[in-house]
Image (tube, rainbow, N blue to C red):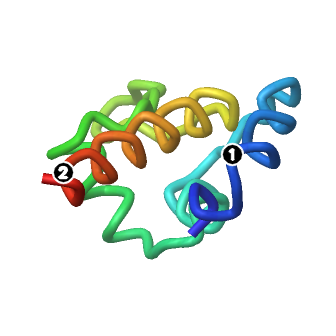
Amino acid sequence: MRAAAGKQEIEGSQAERRRLASWKEIADYAGVSVATVQRWEKSEHLPVHRHMHCKIGSVYGFTDEFDTWLLGRDAVLTSLDAE
C-alpha cells in the first residue's frame, strides 16, 4: 500500500499535484483494489471529486489530497492498534 511506503516518500510527493481521472487510477496510486477505494469513499471519506453529467458523474482526485488522507488514516489505525 502506498501509505506504508514511508512518510518521507509521501511527504516528498505532496509537492506533485497530479490528477487521477478514474477509480482505477486512484486504486493503482493507493496500491489497493477499486472496490477498496470505493468503500473508503463511502465509509472513510476518501477525498474524491465528481464531474456531474446527465446520469452519472465521473470521478477524479488529486495525489496530494490522497497522500494527506492516507497519512491521517495511518495515524488513526496506528493509535487504534496501540489501544
Q: What element carries label 2?
A: helix
Q: Name the residue under label 2.
A: 80
Which residue is most to the front? 82
**Residue 66: percent from the left, percent from the top?**
56, 38
Residue 56, placed above or below residue 80: above
Q: Residue at x 46, y 27 (%)?
A: 49
Task: Report helix, strand or loop for mark 1.
Answer: helix
The answer to the question of whether label 2 and label 1 lie on touching residues, with beta carbons closer than 8 A, is no
Q: Give the image location of residue 12, x and y in percent.
A: 86, 36
Please state the horizontal and vertical placement of residue 9, each as a whole percent of the image. 81, 48
The local crowd at label 1, few if under 14, some if 14 to 19, many if 20 or more residues have their Cα within 10 Å, is few
Indicate the amino acid at tag 1: Lys
Image quadrant where residue 21 sits: top right
For the point 18% across and 51% down, the residue is: 80
Task: Count the marks.
Answer: 2
Which sits in the foreground, 68 or 34? Answer: 68
Residue at 42%, 34% in the rendered image: 72
The percent position of residue 31, horizontal first and vertical second, equals: 58, 70
Q: Mark 1 points at which residue?
A: 7
Q: Name the quadrant containing residue 4.
A: bottom right
Against 60, residue 1 (above or below) is: below
In the image, 78 versus 48, the foreground residue is: 78
- Marks 2 and 1, the one that precedes in the sequence: 1
Residue placed furthest toward the bottom = 33
In-image side of 76 versus 64 (left or right): left
Q: Which of 24 and 47 is in front in this view?
A: 47
Instruction: Report the Cα–Cα distance between label 2 and label 1.
Output: 19 Å
